[in-house]
Amino acid sequence: MSQLPLSPREAALIDLLAQGHTDATAAQELGISKRSVSNMMRSLMDRLEVDNRFQLGAALGALNIVTAPDARRDS
């Protein structure tokens, strides 16, 4: 689980959700359906072998794919 290849769309989705967007607003920003967002999230959860979004966030944080909100503000 040290590396997780992400498509550009997956990376963009993760970034939007980490910023606090809902599935609906993230879908709108990306020009995709909410169902596509759900499918992408399920795919990521399956690949990281986690059961829910909280665990997904923790796993993505452990891989340094997402950072805590306070860390993003300092950038």
Image (cartoon, grey):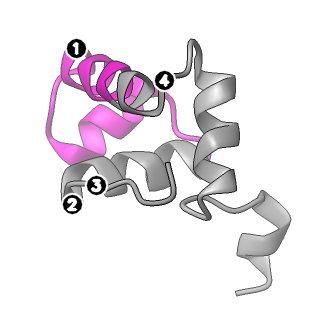
Q: Which residues are magenta?
A: 20-43
* The C terminus, quarter of image: bottom right
Instruction: Assess whether mark 3 and mark 2 are in contact (beta carbons under 8 angstroms).
Output: yes
Report which residue position mark 3 lands on. Answer: 6
Q: Amino acid at mark 3?
A: Leu
Q: Give the residue displayed 79% in from the left and 72% down from the top.
A: 71
In this rendering, the label closer to the viewer, 2 or 3: 3
**Mark 1 vs mark 4, CA separation in Å:** 20 Å
Would you say 28 lies left or right of 51 here? Answer: left
Return the disc, 1 or 3, that comes first in the chain's sequence. 3
Q: Main secondary structure of the magenta part?
A: helix
In this rendering, the label closer to the viewer, 1 or 3: 3
**Mark 1 vs mark 2, CA separation in Å:** 18 Å
Q: Give the residue displayed 28% in from the left and 33% down from the top.
A: 27
Q: Pinpoint residue 7: horizontal percent, then vertical percent.
A: 20, 55
Q: Pinpoint residue 46: horizontal percent, then vertical percent.
A: 38, 21
Return the disc, 1 or 4, that comes first in the chain's sequence. 1
Q: Pinpoint residue 70: horizontal percent, then vertical percent.
A: 85, 66
